[in-house]
Image (tube, coloured by chain):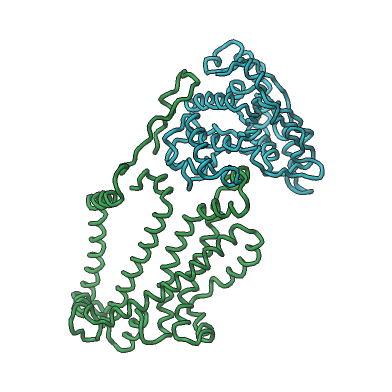
Amino acid sequence: MLTSLDRTNTKTMRGAIRIEGAVKVYGNAERSVVAVDNCSLECPPGEITMVVGPSGCGKTTLLNAIAGFHSLTSGAIYLDDEMLCGPGKPKADPGSDRIVVFQNGALFPWKTNLENVVFGPVMQGKLSIGEARDKARTMMAEAGLSGLENDYPGQISSGVRRRVEIVRALMNDPKVLLLDEPYRALDSLTKSVMHESLLETCYRNRITVFFITHDLEEAIFLGDQVVIMTSRPCRTKKLLKIDLPHPRNYSIVTSNRFRELMDETMDAVHEEAMAAFRLGEREG
Amino acid sequence: MASDTESSTAGRPGIQGRPVARKVLGPFSGYSKIEAAFYHLKAWLKSPSPYLMVLGFMLLMGFWWLSVEVWKLPRFAGMPGPTAVVREWFSREPTFGLSFYTPDYYLHILTSLQRVFIAFVLSTLIGVPLGLIIGWSRTARDYIFPVLEMLRPIPALAWVPLAILMFKSSEGPVVFLTFLPAFFATTLNSMLGVHSIDESYFRAADCLGASRWQVFRHIVVPGALPFVFTGLEISIGLAWFSLVAGEMIAGEYGLGYVIYTSYTMVSYPTIVIGMITLGVVGYVSSAIIRAVGMLLMSWRSRELGLGGQ
């Protein structure tokens, strides 16, 4: 197990995301909605950035822009100082250096878990099927998923499915993992186990994580930094460095420092939730 | 179905990798497919469904028998009763020339089967790829879909004159008329199948670096398969449906031909023999399609019921 000190030392300097003045306007000249308004944000490499905001505030739009699913109206996004999208190139190309883990899960239900996990490297021709299978078995074993290789995603619980999906992402050795409220549908007991499992994965892989949630407790427990977003249009309202030591487990939830951090952020989040409530924003 | 492997470890466990030790085993794990099939058969025989099925058929036959042969309702006057039909069907020397014992009976079935088979295979070979491409590519959809939608409501019977003009042979028009509705059903359902695929699967494939062709092969085709097979089931039903229309224009053989000529020849029991045979053969062919679909989509039955009961 790596301590927080080890973690700083061995941190690789890759996977830094820089968002500069991102703007996203939906619709046309007559009816337009500003989803993201002049949002700037830096995600340090190898750290977990938690983006918190009320449902429908536009944080998924930001994630989609990083992943390359949507274009930006203006502004720029850089990955390790390389422009993903920006002036002259509104939409980033999706790539295996930034992999999304989706809100409702996107394991292919017609492929077994193992076939899902080998999908990335095999499609890109990086590994032969045999090599990919060996690597996949090893990685699934490391994540505690042995024995599920030949099951279909529909046969395992949704919590385990998320873990398989994260392994599928890690198979590509990505710089960044983009998570869009992946644990939203899970019950709170499963969620707490999933959180520890994710942290463990991050300790092992030293990867930048961009994690969207509306759950403040989740954000503080997992995050190295927590970014609180304003309700639509989405802008950074407050950035908070989380100084809870690593490795973390669920006992810290009851610690004083955790409570202090909760207090510090609760008001800001509540304010935005009220704003969203007044606007009557749709979920999603 | 899969019980939650996590909840039991909740509380305050350590962070070390916890193996997901066991998995839920289906009732047939470790058994062969034949044993599984026997298990299903036994379970089916124990359930009320086979007996209700028999009862349903008996009710239909009873109603037929009562209305035609016992009550002799005016509406049904002149119709052949079930005893007349059965007697004719099992007769070694049938009055009207068609029974289980005459080779012609099987020749008619075979001819119809062959036509439906050719039409069905053609409609599948053309319809499935076309539907998948229309569903997948917006450009292809813009070109082809409006044309399809315009042609689709035209019933097979309305195509008869053109079919005769187009094909000089006698088989050509029949197969063409059988093919048309099957083709439309297959194409449309394949297209809807692609539309039914969740957007996030496409996005995930993009993230994982799949090329456009790989997306088609690994996402579009398997993702649309459930709808494709629904389409094929409908399509084979429609093929039998329009076969009769086709066989009325082409002479000599086929079940549709039997039904039509029996009417003009006043051999009424033979009409019913032809109809019931058509029903049974149609039912069996749909069942075969369904079985093939289940076989190809084992992930689905496993997902729905862990072993598919």
Q: Residue furthest right?
A: A87
Please say if B286 is above or below A258.
below
Residue shown at 44%/83% (left/top)?
B171
**Quadrant the N terminus of chain B occupies:** top left
Give the image location of residue A38, x and y in percent. 78, 34
Residue shown at 76%/49% (left/top)?
A28
Please say if B159 is above or below B203.
below
Q: Nearer the viewer, residue A1 or A27?
A: A1
- Residue B64, located in which quarter of the rendered image? bottom left
Chain colored green: B
Q: Nearer the viewer, residue A172 or A191?
A: A172
- Residue B78, located in which quarter of the rendered image? bottom left
Give the image location of residue A246, x and y in percent. 59, 17
Chain A display color: cyan
Q: Is residue B75 visible?
A: no
Q: Nearer the viewer, residue B128 or A201?
A: A201
Q: Residue furthest bottom?
A: B265
Q: Would you say B87 lies left or right of B186 here?
A: left
Give the image location of residue A52, x and y in percent. 65, 28
